[in-house]
Amino acid sequence: MRLHEYQAKQVFADAGIPTPASQLAETVDEAVDAAEEIGYPVAIKAQVHVGGRGKAGGIKLVESKEEAREAAEDIIGMDLKGYHVSKVLVEEAVDFVNELYVGVTMDRGEGRPVAMVSTKGGVNIEEVAEEDPDAIAREHIDPAFGMHPFQARKVVYEAGVDREVANDVASVLTTLYQLWDDRDGADTEINPLMITSDDEVIAADAVMNIDGDALFRQPEIAEMGEEAAEGDELEQKADEYGFDYVRLDGNVGIIGNGAGLVMTTLDLVDYYGGEPANFLDVGGGAKADRIANALDMVFSDDNVDSVVFNIFGGITRGDEVANGINQALEQFDEIPKPVTVRLAGTNAEEGMEILNEDLVTVEHTLEDAVQRAVEYAKEVEA
Amino acid sequence: MSVLVDEDTRVVVQGITGGEGKFHTEQMLEYGTNVVAGAVPGRGGQEVAGVPVFDTVQGAAREADANAAVVFVPPAFAGDACFEALDAKGIDLVVAITEGIPTQDMARVYRKLQETDTHLVGPNCPGVITPGVAKLGILPGNIFSEGNVGLVSRSGTLTYQVVDNLTNRGIGQSTAIGIGGDPIIGTDFIGALEQFEADPDTHAVVMCGEIGGEDEEEAARFIGEHMDTPVAGFIAGRTAPPGKRMGHAGAIVSGSGTGTAQSKITALEDNGVPVGDTPEEVADHVEDLL
């Protein structure tokens, strides 16, 4: 779960990391008032989870009240790479001489956290990692001990950070690791960490991704996460129903159980010449109600022309799935979109007997079911 | 022969008094698994499905000679349950079924694991089955059949799908290992492949991977350098867009070209592993390899 910049900055500032003066604004007037109060130049920054906000026009540097108004009018309400901008952060523009990158993340290959520092801050760090991996100094942390103070110093010196600011940068990194550890961080990053001509160190951006599985013990962060929730209507509906759901561009709706099998179903739709409309995993042990909700979700996506169910029962039972499908479809006078069903595994035979074949097409193998669903989608398209 | 699980496996179920724990204990017993104990703090002395419950895993290992633990404990407490099993003398296999354990808890468990000789499978996995002998976990026993193909997979239901394709052609399995879909897991692909390579009764292996991380790429190199047993592969997530999490916490393609389906497929093929476009095609490859 990812916090907005303004939320992450608040968390960082509360922990003692220096951040620029800033105010959150939801209207043009609020943004202009904030800019006047902070004093020019200020940056007006869209609060959405989009990489490359600056290039896409979501961040503007302004020098006067008129410019602030113009920028706020442009940014508030804009569509930034598919995300609606409803909030901006109005922030003191920092006059910097250097930009660093500082981050802590889980190295899943090593099964340990890693602290990273680079003097190539202010640009896309993934690109730096790709093109010039030696430009990022890394230090793995033993989770049994946490980060030793020397490790923070070591990675800062290894990165080639100026001696004048090395201690302050190490101190920021130590705090960042502590936050990562205390708040169940997945990634915590500052990019750029700005160095001013007075050798001051200031976090000009803040990234905080929290492990979604740990929210039960991070109530404050969970509350912030609710504010940060974004995505289209369908994705929010999926959250309500508790489905793992990802919307895609195609027209074949897909419902299945288990992430690997659902991904495979998407891949097969593509393989047989169709285009997947979504990833929807109902999870293990889904009962009839949950199946009906899944169907409701996929039906409410206007792009969907045909739906395929692929259930391989382990803890999920075929009879429950069949009852859910019948229950969802029997309320329609006319089935809105053709539904193809493939059931295998636990109680699959009972399920196939229960399924109302006036309402759905039943196929016996994964390959046949996907091909049938793709054909239906093409018929509707034509 | 088989790997990890055989006739001598004696199971303690952690969380046996919970709904899932009880249901799957019954299922495991029905399959013929030697479940000798349960472990739930404060429930020592009770019985579930005819199995005696102990307060600690160590008690179950000492009193009931358990040598393998299966974890059905809720996510908030499952990290501690894994620690307890790794700490218990006499337990040399831990299978963690629980989904949704915080990653930082697993990083600590993983750290502990490095100090022991114990095998950990999972978490967030369907378990391990040696067909006809025993199953540890939630895999539906009826789709498996005895034979000589080893199977290792990150995903539960995808494992079932591939096993079904194999069983329908009369190709049985030596052992199937679901290693789990989380970012940090105990036994990884290489750990499972090492086991299969050392097992004379495993004549071919199916490896089912998915997008995210670089485990499949590393496993591909391991196969090329260290394995005589032939391997067939499958990779899920070819159509996944970058940056989106496809259900499994581990299944996310980073923006920078690593962890994609294509990079994994290429790595496997470069090391002599035929990769199927469909599960049915995987079964074709296995038939060719045997």
Image: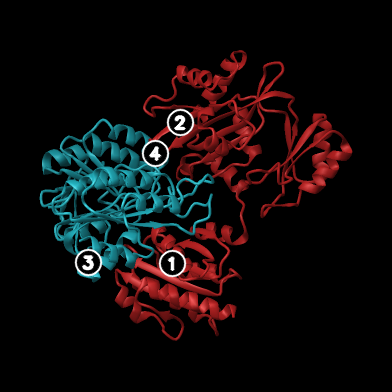
Chain colours: A red, B cyan
Q: Secondary structure at mark 4?
A: loop
A326 over A314 or under it: above or below: below
From this viewpoint, which residue is outermost toward the top?
A: A164
Q: Chain of mark 1?
A: A
Q: Mark 4 to mark 1: distance in Å?
A: 29 Å
The Cα atoms of the two marked residues, 1 and 2, are separated by 37 Å
Q: CA distance from mark 1 to mark 3?
A: 26 Å
Read off the chain for label 3.
Answer: B
Amino acid type, residue under disc 4 in the picture: Gly
Give the x, y percent position of residue A255.
46, 67
Q: Specify whether A109 is left or right of A127.
A: left
Q: Residues within 10 Å of mark 2 (few under 14, many from 20)?
A: many
Q: Residue at x 33, y 66 (%)?
A: B281
Which sits in the foreground, A299 or A103? A103
Q: Are marks 3 and 2 in contact (CB under 8 Å)?
A: no
Amino acid type at circle 3 is Asn
Name the residue carrying label 1: A268
What label does residue B142 carry, if any?
3
SS label for mark 3 = helix
Real-space Cα separation, disc 4 to disc 3, in angstroms: 35 Å
Mark 1 vs mark 2: tell me if same chain: yes
Q: Pointer 2: what residue?
A: A114
If you read the primary sequence from the N terminus, does the residue marked by circle 1 or circle 2 appear first? Answer: 2
